[in-house]
Image: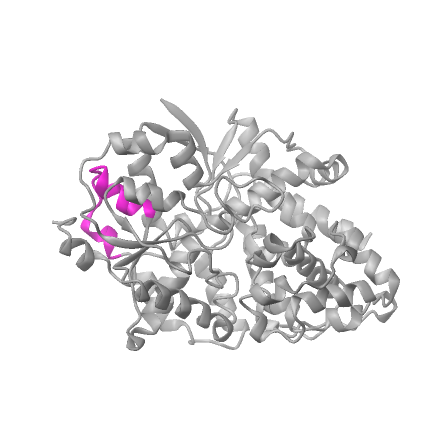
Amino acid sequence: MGKARTIRTDKVIQGAGFAHRIKEKSGEDVFRCYQCLKCSTGCPMAEAMDILPSQVIRMAQLGRGEELLRSETIWVCVSCYTCSIRCPNDIHIAHVMDTLRELALKQGIPPKRGRVILFHQLFLASIREYGRVYEAKLLAKYEAKSGELMKNARLGLAMFRKGKIALLPHKVADIKGVRETFARLKEGDEG
Amino acid sequence: MKRIGYYPGCALLSSAKDYNVSIHAVFERLGVVLEEVEDWICCGASSAHATDDLLALALPARTLALTEQAGLSALLAPCSACFSRLLLASERMKGDEDLSRRVNGVIDPLHYRGTVEVKNILDVLVNEIGISEISDHLVRGLDGIRVVAYYGCWLTRTMRVPSFDDCEDPRSMDRILAAVGAEPLPWSAKMDCCGGSLGLMEEGLTQGLCRNILRAARDVGAEAMVTTCPLCQANVDIFAYKHKDEDISVPIMYLTDLLGIALGCHLKGSHWRKKFIDPSGVLKRHALLS
């Protein structure tokens, strides 16, 4: 991770505004939750979370945005959709987690699990460069930047020997179009 | 001859090349032509949806638009992550004109009209081809090899889109395996998440998930695990390889690997050595490999 960007506190919304922003941006009606706790009891990552999924939804209703955006939970969630599929009120909780992650990043809040976001950024950079993921370069860059150099070296070598890592990237023909898509999204963000 | 659009996805070009091989062998045997969508791009996987919703829609939308351009009405995505991302993007665009306009604006000059049906491999095998058709092609029964069908998380968790199989207790893979002479065992972890989306970065957090899955497979006496997801395969296989000392390793194969044997496809000896936990021993015990 590079140095954390300054937090644009003016944009961190607390209170009712935050709750409605989450509802609008995610398209999920978090106000329907009546705390049955099915999401938390079925969550495979609950043990590692500082705020349980059911608590995330409650805190979203209460507009406690600051705590949510700074939580471990949003970076620990594996997006397995167990919570979403079981919610009796049809709240796609895993998608709400996505919305919280996106807001946290856009607010410049340093994520609790820095390696996770580093990986996501390198993964997306790979798509922008080639249109498809070029694992060899992605893994090498990740190892170098995460400070975990050599941690997975033995595994990498074993994968290479088994022909599980392609030597060369598979660049798509219309890479210009792919990059335009990325560029337009970036413009939209800043506008 | 049936034809269906094919989206191999990035994993099938690298870590899961062997999956791509056995899929092609099996579909050829079943008389289905896989038409790879030209110039498809990565679905964005977890990295897109975890960081930018519009990007998570735009990346699949580019490929879906290309699928339409190629005149294909259905698209087979064997990887559960690709399947989930493509399906959810397609369905959200279909159901929301304003969103569709925004996404199409970002991928212009490509344009997705919302006509593609995204399919996973179990859906195609059971509902498009049919189990009786698969049985008709049976060359070599699987000798009652005791396996557990591992569905993983995204395959049937299609959210607001009706799933091809029960979202909490799917059985389609078990039915296919039984039809070709394997003995699929009931077990508790068929839908449990392997933690693949965080596996590389937060191994400490996710290794308990893989351990529980392998233990559950061992507890019911499975000789092998069978999956259709390349991310589940890699994650569980690598975990077992790294934790050999724990004595919980069970080989994990693709459904099409076993179907390949059952339908008499020629898979090279090296095919089986692509896995970290080599399944050849188990297969030889059942005289399924010479």
Which span is picked out in magenta?
Answer: B255-273
- Asked if residue B48 can be seen in this view, the reply is no
Q: Residue at x 66, y 53 (%)?
A: A88
Q: Nearer the viewer, residue B278 or B135?
A: B135
Q: Residue at x 48, y 42 (%)?
A: B165
A135 within the magenta span: no
Q: Is residue B254 left or right of residue B97?
A: left
**Residue B59: horizontal and vertical position, in percent?**
60, 45
Q: Nearer the viewer, residue A34 or A116?
A: A34
Q: Residue at x 29, y 77 (%)?
A: B245
* Vertical arrangement, residue A80 with respect to residue B254, above or below: below
**Residue B80: horizontal and vertical position, in percent?**
48, 49
Q: Nearer the viewer, residue B75 or B135?
A: B135
B268 within the magenta span: yes
* Vertical arrangement, residue A120 with respect to residue A169, above or below: below
- Asked if residue A100 can be seen in this view, the reply is yes
